[in-house]
Every structure is written in structure tokens, then in C-alpha cells.
Image: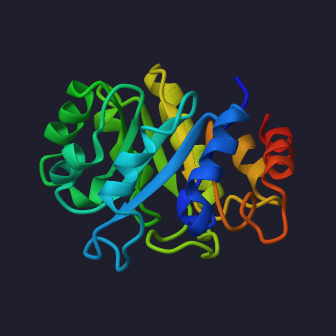
């Protein structure tokens, strides 16, 4: 299976979001990455729930990849219209009753992913391999685009992939954080399946988005 792309909408041109979504959708890009932050779990606010909900009506092929960096994420599910076909990543560090949150995502027809921040050990994922479809490994500290990759990230990606293989489960590994032209191939070699691409690659200034997508596809195939 080739690597799959999930361009980060928070890095796109805010004045042309719908047109950029349409272009990516027509190109057959697998996912659009939608970051939601509550200014508590991370000290920032990005896309609001109304915008995330609105994206659903303009997509024909591309699926929503919703990354909720917030405490008590369930309170936002209805406002985002989470449902069939969506990936929904919630943070291990932000949920008191994580099993209940994962079950809620599944009940809505979406695919639950478990996100872990750089300082969280890979091993915490093992307790949830029976109930998740994927994991999102942060290779930068969450909250802002353009941050440098955290040392040890490649080793962590390889460790997560090893744990998945040991489990025998069919679980996807998504990487989010400084997925740049010079690092994405190494991330792929560590076992990443889905690549959240933003300001360090697809959305670099001066690049044509169609050319950028084609270039990244070659690097992560």
C-alpha cells in the first residue's frame, strides 16, 4: 500500500479554502487534515467546529481527518457532524475516559485514531489496539505549524510500527509534524502510512499545489 496524504487545512490560504479543497478532492488526495484546538490542551485556536462541519458538504472523494487537540473532545462531535468515513484522532493525554470516547467515535460510524504527543511513550498505545483503527504520532509539540521535529521521532515511529506488527492488528500509523520534503521518505521507511503535510512541504510559498502533491506522492509511495 502506498503512503496516503492528508494536507493540513490550517496551513492553506484562508481566503481560498473552498477552492483548495476542491482541487485536492479532484486530484484524488485521500484525506484533508482538520485541526481543532481548544486553547487549553494546547495554547492556540485554529479551525472552528462550524468550518470543520462545513467541509463535509464540499467533499466528494476526499475524507475528513479530524485531529482534536482538546480536553473532553466528545462535546465537539455533534458540532463537527462526525460520521461515516471520518477519521477522528483524540489525544491520549486529554481524555479521562478514553475508552468511552473511542466507543462514541465508532458508534457514529467514524474511525477512531489515538494521538500521542512527543513526550508520551509509544507503549501506551498497546492497551487500545483492539479498539482503534489507527494512531497519530506527533513528531512536533502540538499547537502550531512550522515547528522543528523533536529529536528521537524516527525511533519512536519505528517503535510504534513494531508494536503494531507485534499486535497482529491492522492499524494505520499517521505522522503529524514537520513532514518536510527531506524527512517524509525517512518517515515512510519507519512505517508511516498517512502523512499530514503542511507548511514544510505542500503549502510552502510559491509551490503549485498540484505539482507539490505529485512530488510528495513519489516520495512516500
Q: Is residue 24 above or below residue 48?
A: above
Q: Is residue 103 left or right of residue 151?
A: left
Instruction: Name the residue furthest bottom.
Output: 43
- For the N terminus, the image quarter is top right
Q: Position of residue 197 (x, y in %)?
A: 65, 55
Q: Position of residue 16 (x, y in %)?
A: 61, 61
Q: Quadrant of residue 8?
A: bottom right
The residue located at (53%, 27%) in the rendering is 165
Q: Is residue 25 left or right of residue 127?
A: right
Q: How is the image coloured?
A: rainbow
Q: Position of residue 99 (x, y in %)?
A: 18, 38
The residue located at (63%, 69%) in the rendering is 149
Q: Nearer the viewer, residue 129 or 115?
A: 115
Q: Is residue 167 above or below residue 59?
A: above
- For the C terminus, the image quarter is top right
Q: Is residue 58 visible?
A: yes
Q: Is residue 191 visible?
A: no
Q: Is residue 208 left or right of residue 8?
A: right
Q: Nearer the viewer, residue 101 or 36?
A: 36
Q: Position of residue 78 (x, y in %)?
A: 20, 43
Amino acid at each position: 500500500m502506498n503512503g496516503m496524504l492528508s494536507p493540513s487545512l490550517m496551513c492553506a490560504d484562508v481566503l481560498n479554502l473552498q477552492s483548495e479543497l476542491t482541487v485536492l478532492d479532484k486530484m484524488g488526495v485521500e484525506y484533508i487534515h482538520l485541526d481543532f484546538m481548544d486553547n487549553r490542551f494546547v495554547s492556540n485556536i485554529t479551525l472552528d467546529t462550524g468550518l470543520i462541519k462545513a467541509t463535509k458538504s464540499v467533499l466528494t472523494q476526499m475524507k475528513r481527518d479530524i485531529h482534536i487537540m482538546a480536553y473532553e473532545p466528545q462535546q465537539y462531535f455533534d458540532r463537527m457532524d462526525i460520521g461515516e468515513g471520518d477519521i477522528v484522532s483524540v489525544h491520549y493525554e486529554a481524555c479521562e475516559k478514553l475508552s468511552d470516547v473511542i466507543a462514541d467515535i465508532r458508534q457514529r460510524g467514524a474511525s477512531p485514531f489515538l494521538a500521542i504527543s512527543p513526550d508520551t511513550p509509544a507503549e501506551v498505545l498497546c492497551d487500545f489496539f483492539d479498539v482503534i483503527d489507527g494512531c497519530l504520532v506527533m513528531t512536533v509539540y502540538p499547537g502550531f505549524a512550522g515547528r522543528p521535529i523533536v529529536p528521537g521521532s524516527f525511533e519512536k515511529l519505528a517503535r510504534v510500527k513494531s508494536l503494531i506488527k507485534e499486535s497482529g492488528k491492522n492499524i494505520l500509523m499517521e505522522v503529524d509534524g514537520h513532514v518536510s520534503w527531506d524527512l517524509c521518505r525517512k518517515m515512510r521507511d519507519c512505517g508511516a502510512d498517512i502523512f499530514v503535510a503542511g507548511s514544510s512541504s505542500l503549502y510552502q510559498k510559491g509551490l503549485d499545489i498540484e505539482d507539490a502533491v505529485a512530488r510528495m506522492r513519489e516520495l512516500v509511495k
